Amino acid sequence: MTRHTIGLLLGTEEDWPTAFEEIMRRLGPVEGPDGGSHAFDVERITIEPFSLRDRPRYELVIDRLAYWYYVPREWLKKVAMMDDVYLLNSPFTFQSMEKHAAYCAMLRLGLKVPETVLVPYKNPVDNARYAYTAARYNQPFDLDAIAERIGYPLFMKPYDGGAWRGVSRINGPAELHAAYDASGEMLMHLQKAVDYDVFARSLSIGAETMVMKFQPDQPMHLRYAVDHNFLSPEGGEEVVTIGRLVNAFFKWEFNSCETLVKGGEVYPIDYANACPDVALTSLHYYFPWAMKALVRWCVFALVTGRRANIDMETDRYFAIAAETGMSYAEKLAAYRALADAYFETERYHDFCATRLPRLDQIVLDWVTGPDFDQLLVRTVQSVYPAHEHDKFIAHLRGLLHLWVRDESARLAVA
Ligand SMILES: Nc1ncnc2c1ncn2[C@@H]1O[C@H](COP(=O)(O)OP(=O)(O)O)[C@@H](O)[C@H]1O
Ligand SMILES: [Mg+2]
């Protein structure tokens, strides 16, 4: 029996870690391709001083904390660099590659990133050398002319954005100047607005991608709509490919990707959301899928001895981008092949079918039973004020009931 310890690096969340721990417990040991048995312990990682020579207890870590808390971030770098711990996600690409870097990479690969311009800081940078340097080297620029060239409406948003911080939609010069004045010490992009038909947000966990219809104007609990046919089959494939490409390129294994779809064209706008929100209250219907995918991917990585790798190897993608004889669709197919090779997609699906055949039923039984309902109730109680508890409990129960119905039908056919 081989034992594997999975570490969870957590902030305030209680819902998905509880779900993950419970599904792993119900799953029990898994037989590997070599016939050996593999058992899994899941532990929540605590923050404490560490010697750079310490050996970590964890073989794999899922991180939802290091994006704002730097002690665990530096610990993640240490265990990635020194101990080959398998990370969802590696700080070497997650913390060093923000939205701006991701735009640049995807532009080079020929993706339809809307016209985007980086403008210098509105306020002086807090550094004694700034005044002299700016006076000597900063070129004056005409913000209105840049905006005119891009065309209104446009978006102003931080180069390293997340969670809508500092994002504004701009319809004309007055709003442009107001938003730029307000940007202060933030470094901003101006980006052409896409007047989209539908917003597709994909969540990827390892080799799996779920494409969901996203409604950014709705409150959190209504942003993901349950709709299985909102894209054409080709459009859906393209969104999956873009998500998987971004993730393979940056070696992000747990990330969400936002694309705007307009008349058959897919425009990616935000895809540096590594370690994304997977709360029960926002994912609702899709929550069981996300938990299963997380369990499957961790088990697959551990049992097959998948190695973490912090080399970027970007040249392989850029070589395809530089091919003059290839169409956009051909390039996407070639990128997809590289991405699927990175995620070992075929081997992964075969592993799930042969090594984890019971998982679907285990999760269905759990979601149908009282333990899950308790988790749902406790989660609502911790997220919403008392007078909204009944409403949100009913809302989530309804959506999960719908999932149970669909999943039961799916398993009955399978
Ligand atoms: N180019 C664009 N065209 C249309 N809508 C956009 C564009 N850029 C951003 N938005 C809107 O603003 C929201 C936040 O922008 P986004 O780039 O996703 O920033 P964040 O990283 O903060 O989520 C998006 O979800 C979308 O609704
Ligand atoms: Mg976004």
Image: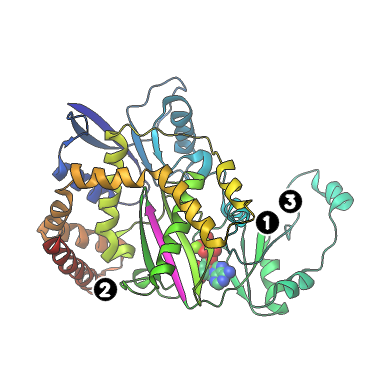
Q: Amino acid at mark 2?
A: His
Ligand 1: does it lie within 8 Å of the C-beta at label 1?
A: no
Extent of the magenta region? 198-204
Quarter that holds the N terminus: top left
Q: How many marks?
A: 3
Near-viewer residue (407 or 82): 407
Q: Is residue 2 above or below residue 157?
A: above
Q: Are marks 1 and 3 in contact (CB under 8 Å)?
A: yes
Compare marks 3 and 2 and give the one earlier in the sequence.
3
Q: Are marks 2 and 1 in contact (CB under 8 Å)?
A: no
Say which element carries label 1: loop
**Mark pair 1, 3: CA separation:** 7 Å
Q: Which mark is residue 185?
A: 1
Q: Is residue 368 left or right of residue 92?
A: left
Percent position (x, y) of residue 383?
31, 62
Say which element carries label 2: helix
Q: Taking the image as drawn, is residue 164 in sight?
A: no
| Mark 1 surroundings: few (<14), some (14-19) or many (≥20) residues within 10 A | some
Percent position (x, y) of residue 396?
23, 69
Image colouring: rainbow
Near-viewer residue (219 or 409): 409
Provide the residue designation for mark 2: 387
Compare marks 1 and 3 and give the one earlier in the sequence.
3
Quarter that holds the C terminus: bottom left
Quadrant assignment for ligand 1: bottom right
Provide the residue designation for mark 3: 125
Compare marks 2 and 1 and give the one earlier in the sequence.
1
Q: Is residue 233 left or right of residue 142?
A: left
Percent position (x, y) of residue 73?
47, 38
- Residue at 47% over, 29% down: 78
| Mark 3 surroundings: few (<14), some (14-19) or many (≥20) residues within 10 A | some
Percent position (x, y) of residue 97?
56, 47
